Image (tube, coloured by chain):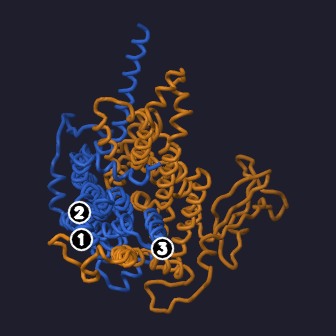
Chain colours: A orange, B blue
Amino acid sequence: MSAEAVPSPVEERRPQKRKTSDLARSEERLAYLLLFPTLLVIFLIAFYPLGSVFYNSLTDRTFASAREPQFIGLANYANLLSITIKELPPEIDEETGEIVRDPDTGEIDYVSPVSVLPREPRRYRELTTFGLGGTRYVIGASDVNFVRAIWDTVAFTVVTVALELVLGLGIALVVNSEFKGRGLMRVVMLVPWAIPTAVSSRMWEWMFRDTRAGFFNIVFQDLGLGNGQIPFLVDKAWQLPAMITIDVWKTTPFMALLLLAGLQLISHDLYEAADVDGAGRLRQFWSITLPLLRPTIAVALVFRTLDAIRVFDVFQIVLQQKRYSMATYAYYELIDGQRMGYSSAASVVIFFVIFVFAVLYIRMLGVRND
Amino acid sequence: MTEQRTNWIGRILFWLVIIVIAIYLLFPFYWAINSSLKSEAQLQMTPGTYLPRNPADGSIDLFFRNYTAVFQNQRFITGLKNSVIVAVSTTALSLLIGSFGAFALGKLRFRGKQPSLYLILSMTMFPQVAVLTGLYAVIRTLNLDAIPSMILSYLLFTLPFTTWVMTSFFEGLPTELMQSAQVDGATPFQTFYKILLPLTMPALVTTGLLAFINAWNEYLFALTFTTIEPNARTVPVAIALFTGQVSFQEPFGEIMAAAIVVTIPLLLLVLIFQQRIVAGLTAGAVKG
C-alpha cells in the first residue's frame, strides 16, 4: 500500500483483503454519488418542466391573472388543431336564381368562406381554398396561425434537410479528396456553423433587403429578374424560400462535416479494388460510398431533422410575427399572450411531431440503437 | 496525351468547385464586413456596392464609425459581459458535473448503468422548446434572476452532450490504470481525479469548446428569460433587438459591425481548435 493513499471514510483500510462484494458495493455507491448531480440537473430542467408543460397544456393557465387555472381537458389541443373542409357553393343571384359570374373573366363567384365555416363550438377561419372535380372547397381552422405554422415548419424541414443532404454530401465528397489547403477548407466549413444564428439571421436579413441595397435584389436584377424591389421577407411566396436559404447555408457545413467523418471511415482498398475491376467513379459512388455511408447519413438526417422541426431563431428574428414556425408560435403565445396553457399545448404538439419524425427515421433507415 | 489533358481539365474543374464552395460559405460574412464599413449614405446606395465606395465619385471609402459606435453602445457591452459570464459558467458547470457522471458511466460497475446511458443519449436530442413554458414558470415562481436561469437551463443542451462524449472517452482509457492504482491503495475517486482526469484533458477541451460555443450562441432561452430583465441580455439577444442610439431606422451598419465583433472570437476559436471541434461535432454521431 502506498504511503500517500488516503483511505476514504466509507472504505476499510485494507482494500485488498476485502470481499469482492464489499468492493463492488462501494464502487456502486460511488457511481451513484457521481451520477447524482447529472441526474438531478436533468430532472430539474428537463423532466419536471416537461411534466409541467404536459399538465399545463390541459389547463387555461395564464400569467397575468390571479385567477386559479381551470382544468379544461383537451380544449387547448382542440383549438390548436381543429380543421374542417366545407364545400363552397357558388354565389346565387337572389333575383334571377342564377349563378353569379365575374363580369370580366366569366368565372364563377363563390360565397365568402366565412359564411360556410362553422362558428360553434369554435369559430373557424379560412386557411385556404382549392378546387377539385369542379367543386370549390374551403379548409378552415380554428387556429389558422398554428395550423399554418405546422405546415410551414414541416415543409421547411423537408426542403432544408433534403437540400442540406445533397449539398453536404457534395461538399464532403470534394473535401474528402487529397489536396493542398484541405485543412483551410475545413476551417472555412466551420465558419457558418460557428456564427451565432442570431447574427447570421441579421446578416441575411440585410442581404434580403427589399431595395437594390440588398444583395439578392442586386443579383436578381442583374439577371433580369424582378424590379430590384422584391420584398423577400414580406411577400408570402418568398418568405419560406428565404428562410430555407438562410438555414441551408447555416447548417450544411455541419452535415458536410458529419458525412466527411463518415467518408474517412471507408477503406481506400475498396476503391482500389473497384479500380482494378474497372468500375467507374459513378459506379463506385453508388456501390461503395453510398451503402457504406448509410449509417452516417441516417444519423446526420436524424440530427438535422429534429433540429429543423424546432427552428426558432431565424423565424423569430427575420419574420417575427409575419409568419410563424411552430416554436415561434409557442413563444409568442407565452410571452406576448401570456397564455401559458395554450403555449404549453403548442409545445407538446412540437414534441410529438419531433417524436413522430424520430420514429419514422428509425423505421426507415434502420438506425441501430446499440 | 489525351489522358494528361483530361487530367488537367479535371484539376481545374476541381479547384473551381472548391472556390465556389468557399465563396458560398464565406460570402454572407464578407457582405457583413463590407456593410459594416459603410456609412448610412453608402448603405443606401443602389445598387449596393461590393466594396464600400464613396457615393460621389465611386472611390473606395471605408467608414469605421460603426465600430466605435458599437463599442460605445452600453447595451452591447453589457451583452458581451453577460455572454461571457453565462457561457463560461455553463461550460465550467457542465464539465464538472459531466465528468463525474461520465467517470461513473465509463469506468464503474453499477446496476442501472444501461438505462442511465440511454437516458443521457436521448437527452442529447431533447427539444429545448418543449420545456420552454415549464422552465419559464419554474423561474418566475422561484424568482430566479435571468443570468443564473440561463446558466442552469443551458445545462439542458451542454450537460448530456458533455457526459456522453466524456463517457466514451473514459471507456477508452485502459482499465489496468485503475486496477494498478487500486492495488496501490488509491480509492476509485482518487484514481479518477489524480490519474484518469488528467488523461481526459483532450476530451475536456473538445467538449468544453462545444459547450462554450453553444452557450454563447443560444437564443431562445436567453430571449425568453430576459424579457423582463433587459440588463441581463446576452449578445445574440442584444444583436437581434439592436436599435441605434438615435435614428429611427434600423442601423444596419452598426448591426453588421456588432455581428463581426461577436463572430471574431468564435472564428479565432475555430481557427485554433479546428481539429478538436470537428472531432467533438462528429463524436458519437459517426461510430459505426
The image shows residue B202 at horizontal and vertical percentages of: 26, 54
The image shows residue B22 at horizontal and vertical percentages of: 34, 36
The Cα–Cα distance between marks 3 and 2, rounded to whole angstroms, is 51 Å
- Say which residue label 3 marks: A333
Image position of A365 with respect to A29: above or below: above
The image shows residue B124 at horizontal and vertical percentages of: 43, 63
Residue A99 or residue B10, whichever sits in front:
B10
- Say which residue label 2 marks: B195
Most extreme residue toward the top is: B1
Q: Secondary structure under badge 1?
A: loop
Asked if badges 1 and 2 are on one and the same chain, I answer yes
Image position of A358 with respect to B276: above or below: below
Residue A113 or residue B76, whichever sits in front:
B76
Q: Residues within 10 Å of mark 1 (few under 14, many from 20)?
A: many
Q: Are marks 1 and 3 in contact (CB under 8 Å)?
A: no
Q: Amino acid at mark 1?
A: Ala
- Say which residue label 1 marks: B186
Q: Amino acid at mark 2?
A: Ile
Q: Residues within 10 Å of mark 3 (few under 14, many from 20)?
A: some
Q: Left of B51 or right of it: where is A88?
A: right
Most extreme residue toward the front is: A17
